[in-house]
């Protein structure tokens, strides 16, 4: 009897999703849907937050005031993106503190890309172009995802992202028209970031067993390989404007497929970085933990101040 | 001719030494949650845009400014502590909104009038 009721609820839920009717926080949803979303949204939020670190490293060393102002604005946007997403995840019943804890203890994952170092100024341009570019490719379809708060957060984020990619490309364009050393720096950054960027779409379709369920629930709207192919096609053309090359000797237009063919991805590296052995995993988490711990007194002070003020106000009223 | 170019690399080199990351950070209680409503232009309603944590109303408003109006999206902000929001129950939606279902005559299109009738 009870089982029958659950089956009916699940059927109704799936019907709504199929009809593109959004699911809202108080609506009934399968437990697996809730858990999958919490994981997906919080991972996404963590990525926005950790993503500030490699770029923050260059704020004090930006080559001009204009570059500095735009980089600060971009990094500040990423903090906002983290907040929108944490809020969306919280509507599913997990607390902010719990999510932060999961990040700091290594229980939660974030995008593997942010475990690579930013070694030169050209890296900041390349991150804007490729990393934000890949993020946009991933995020635009999520504006139509089935969970309302997530979709609304994505709409807001996507609006803000487009300047990120453009500022990055502008940095590279300037370098690509500069001295020989600047050109070399530009190519070097592209060489280091290209492969990790296309790994951002996640494992190949045949190695992602949950894709089918996620697509059915519309919390994923394209497969990893579909998005990756789209991204490669776009970048292969854009890189020509820079007069640079993507570091893939097998990259070649395939007229028959209407797509670029590209070389094999080093999935071993991907799994190594995901599981904590990337070049900066420990540094990133340590920086987060340090900021959190050193900010503890500020949070406590604000709480104490608010309590005191509330007491004063109620005393004045009485 | 082969040009050799040396690229200078700074900072952010990656892990030099293992840093503490394993141990759990203590799980502090969150500040209260606030819902944020923003009026984008004079003459328009305040619209719900999202939520955030803050210690008090003043901080909630300031944080809302920093997070939700970075691109001049608003000229007025309301914040309400989330626990004070009461909502209708989606499970009862069918019966709750039922009274309006059979009252199509509340819409102007319900009335049969000749096409010649203008300005109405
Ligand atoms: Fe972002
Ligand atoms: Fe971004």
Image (tube, rainbow, N blue to C red):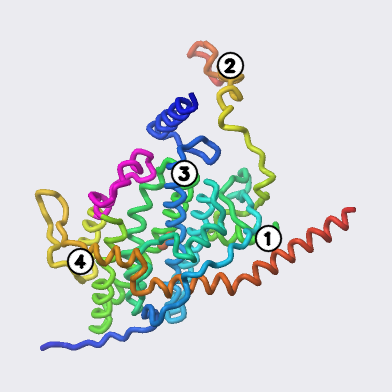
Q: Chain for mark 3?
A: A
Q: CA distance from mark 2 to mark 3?
A: 37 Å
Residue at image location 66% in from the left, 51% down from the top:
B79
Structural distance between the alpha carbons of marks 4 and 1: 51 Å
Q: Residues within 10 Å of mark 2 (few under 14, many from 20)?
A: few
Tag in front: 1 or 2: 1
Q: Quadrant of the C terminus of chain B?
A: top right
N-term mark: 3 or 4: 3
The percent coordinates of residue A182 (x first, y second) are: 28, 81
Circles 4 and 1 on the same subunit: no
Residue ID at (55%, 21%): B119
**Dot 1 crowding, Cα within 10 Å, few <14, some 14–19, many 20+:** many
Per the rendering, the mark at residue A240 is 4
Q: Identify residue for label 1.
A: B55
* Label 4, label 2: how far apart the Cα atoms are: 62 Å
Distance, label 1 to label 2, CA atoms, is 47 Å
Percent position of residue B59, x then y: 67, 61
Q: Which residue is mark 2?
A: B103
Q: Which residue is mark 3?
A: A34
In this view, the residue in front, A143 or A107, is A107
Q: What is the secondary structure assignment of the residue under circle 1?
A: loop
Taking B92 as reference, is A11 left or right? left
Q: In the rendered structure, which segment of residues is drawn in magenta? A: A204-228
Q: Is mark 2 within 8 Å of ligand 1?
A: no
Q: Residue at x 37, y 41 (%)?
A: A218
The spot of residue A116 in percent (x, y) is 34, 72
Asked if A207 appears above or below A2 in the picture, the reply is below
């Amino acid at each position: 009897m009870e089982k029958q009721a659950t089956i009916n609820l699940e059927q109704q839920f799936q019907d709504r999703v199929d009809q593109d009717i959004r699911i809202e926080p108080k609506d009934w949803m399968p437990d697996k849907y809730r858990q999958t979303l919490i994981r997906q949204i919080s991972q996404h939020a963590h990525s926005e937050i950790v993503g500030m670190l490699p770029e923050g490293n260059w704020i004090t060393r930006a080559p001009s005031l204009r570059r500095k102002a735009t980089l600060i604005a971009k990094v500040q946007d990423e903090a906002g993106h983290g907040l929108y997403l944490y809020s969306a995840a919280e509507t599913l019943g997990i607390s902010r503190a719990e999510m932060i804890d999961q990040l700091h203890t290594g229980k939660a994952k974030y995008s593997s890309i942010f475990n690579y170092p930013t070694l030169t100024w050209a890296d900041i341009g390349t991150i804007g172009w490729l990393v934000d570019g890949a993020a946009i490719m991933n995020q635009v379809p999520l504006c139509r995802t089935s969970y309302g708060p997530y979709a609304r957060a994505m709409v807001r984020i996507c609006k803000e992202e487009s300047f990120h990619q453009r500022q990055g490309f502008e940095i590279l364009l300037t370098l690509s028209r500069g001295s020989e050393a600047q050109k070399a720096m530009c190519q070097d950054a592209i060489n280091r970031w290209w492969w990790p960027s296309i790994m951002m779409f996640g494992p190949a379709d045949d190695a992602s067993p949950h894709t089918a369920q996620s697509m059915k629930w519309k919390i994923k709207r394209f497969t990893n390989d579909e998005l990756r192919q789209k991204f490669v096609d776009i970048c292969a053309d854009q890189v020509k404007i820079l007069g640079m090359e993507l570091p893939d000797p097998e990259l070649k237009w395939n007229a028959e497929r209407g797509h670029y063919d590209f070389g094999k991805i080093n999935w071993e590296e991907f799994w190594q970085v995901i599981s904590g052995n990337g070049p900066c995993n420990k540094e990133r988490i340590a920086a987060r933990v340090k900021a959190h711990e050193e900010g503890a007194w500020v949070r406590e002070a604000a709480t104490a101040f608010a309590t005191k003020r509330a007491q004063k106000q109620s005393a004045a009223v009485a | 001719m082969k040009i050799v170019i040396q690229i200078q690399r700074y900072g952010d080199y990656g892990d030099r030494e293992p840093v503490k990351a394993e141990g759990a950070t203590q799980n502090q209680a969150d500040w209260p949650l606030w819902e944020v409503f923003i009026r984008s232009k004079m003459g328009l309603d305040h619209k719900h845009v999202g939520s955030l944590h803050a210690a008090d109303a003043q901080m909630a408003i300031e944080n809302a400014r920093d997070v939700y109006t970075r691109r001049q999206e608003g000229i007025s902000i309301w914040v309400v502590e989330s626990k004070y929001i009461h909502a209708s129950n989606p499970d009862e939606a069918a019966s709750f909104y039922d009274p309006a279902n059979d009252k199509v005559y509340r819409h102007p299109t319900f009335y049969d009038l000749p096409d010649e009738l203008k300005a109405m």
